[in-house]
Amino acid sequence: MAKLTSELEVACPCCDAVLVIDLNLRRVVSHTVPERSDKPELNDATRILEAEAARRESLFEQSIAAEKGRDDALARRFEEAVPPLKRAIELAPRYRLAYAILTQVHRQLGIA
């Protein structure tokens, strides 16, 4: 590909691209990238797009299932927190009632 005597062809050891360097200009004047061996064919495009769509749909279904499970877990934690709070309300004097409820809720929910 080098046409002038001042041009030098160099192959890149990493990507096998061919660089043409002009020694007088001290610049790269041409860069040729080799064809990829793993380049998908146009005939496979619909199959690839369908596979990607199926993968996205699967991830979406997994996220929906995780959100449903999250609601159940929060409801279960709330139901577990109610009996100790009822007991605290029965035993606490009137002036400590609000404080006891708040501290129990915070402990059960892991707030502080």
Image (tube, rainbow, N blue to C red):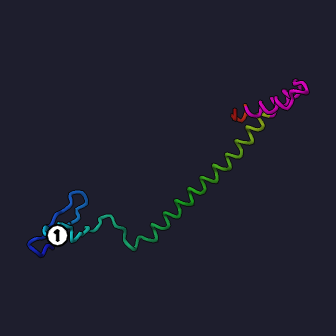
**Does the stretch in magenta take in 1?**
no
The residue positioned 15% from the left and 67% from the top of the image is 9
**Does the stretch in magenta take in 94?**
yes
Q: Which residue is mark 1?
A: 25
Up-down: is 43 above or below 101?
A: below
Up-down: is 95 above or below 13?
A: above
**Front-most of 72 and 84?**
84
**Front-most of 50 and 88?**
88
Q: Which region of the structure is painted magenta?
A: 82-106
Q: Residues within 10 Å of mark 1 (few under 14, many from 20)?
A: few
* Position of residue 53 measured from the top left corner of the image (x, y, whole percent): 52, 64
* Position of residue 45 measured from the top left corner of the image (x, y, whole percent): 43, 71
**37 to the left or right of 79:** left
The residue positioned 91% from the left and 27% from the top of the image is 94
**Front-most of 9 and 108?**
9
Where, by quadrant of the figure, is residue 77 drawn? top right
Extreme bottom residue here?
Answer: 3
Up-down: is 102 above or below 23?
A: above
Where, by quadrant of the figure, is residue 18 drawn? bottom left
* Position of residue 14 measured from the top left corner of the image (x, y, whole percent): 24, 57
The kind of secondary structure the magenta stretch mainly shows is helix
**Front-most of 60 and 23?**
23
Figure quadrant of the C terminus? top right
